[in-house]
Amino acid sequence: MKKSIQLIILLFVSILFGAYSFHLLLNYKPGEKHETTRHSFSAENNYGTALNRDSTRVVSCNTTSILRTLTALKNAGLLLKVRGTLLRRATDPWESHLDGIMNTLVPEKVIPSHQGPDAQYVDPTLNVITAAVKVPETLSHLHYWNVQLTRKASKEEVLDAFKRSSRIAMIEYSQGLSANNTVKELMLALNRPYGDMYEVALWEDMLKVVDDELFYAYLVDNQALVIPETIDAIRALTGIEKDALKSIQKTNIKCTGCLAKVTPVLNETG
């Protein structure tokens, strides 16, 4: 009982303060390294390896988005290697008057940026390299990806792979969703708390397949994306739900405003 109470407390701390790593007895600072817990977590990828552990690290919002999308392609037998560029928002909205950047873009000096190697802590089989650029806005992150597929594939095959994930939502320019501010407004219209989007918002009508190459882009709400992962991680650590899919479904429906409702609403707007 004590273990469960401690984990529940740490869940709320992690959501409020962005502490993506937590332990049964210790709450780690945001941005902890993999070495702190020796385990990094992504619900759709390695839920089972976290069962009844003492600790885990829920990876960052950007890394979580990478794992959701690449795991979907891997599960479909389509993923060979992948290269991505991340346009990272400069700071959090509530701190934009204190720091951040204006009238400039700041590329990260080191390639790969940390997100690719962090994804490999969860899934060492991933052949992924990332580069990142800090941009002068605060709404969300934007990713561009180039994937080498295992074979020639159709756009329909790729979309089917992505749609098998309940935490990837397809958006379209034709729905008026042509930028991150329009997606934020949609989440507010759907009465999501704070306009949060817990899914990766991937542009379906931008996605392009050329023979065995895939190109796509998506948005990441860094204030919301890891909340469902954190809840799933707590279920795994406590062992109260052994099945990853069941935990994910419980979280989607009961804990985060019904993620499954987003796609039907998006289809209606089209």
Image (cartoon, rainbow, N blue to C red):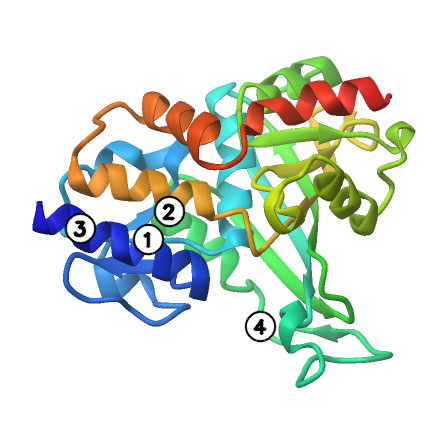
Q: Which residue is drawn at 48% across and 32% down?
A: 71
Give the spatial CA distance, label 1 vs label 3. Answer: 10 Å
| Sequence-earlier tag: 1 or 3 | 3
Q: Which amino acid does label 2 sit on?
A: Thr
Q: What element carries label 1?
A: helix
Mark 4, secondary structure of its residue: loop
User: Tag 1 or tag 2, which sits nearer the N-term?
Assistant: 1
Residue 209 visible, this angle: yes
Q: Do the residues labelled 3 and 4 touch (CB within 8 Å)?
A: no
Q: Where is residue 109 in the image (x, y as percent from the top left)?
A: 63, 76
N-terminal-most mark, 3 or 4: 3
Point out residue 150 in the picture as x, y percentages from the top left corner.
Answer: 57, 24
Label annotation for residue 110? 4
Q: Along the horizontal axis of the image, is 19 left or right of 146?
A: left
- In this rendering, the answer to whether 117 lies above or below 75 is below
**Mark 1 sits on what residue?**
11
Residue at image mark 3 = 5
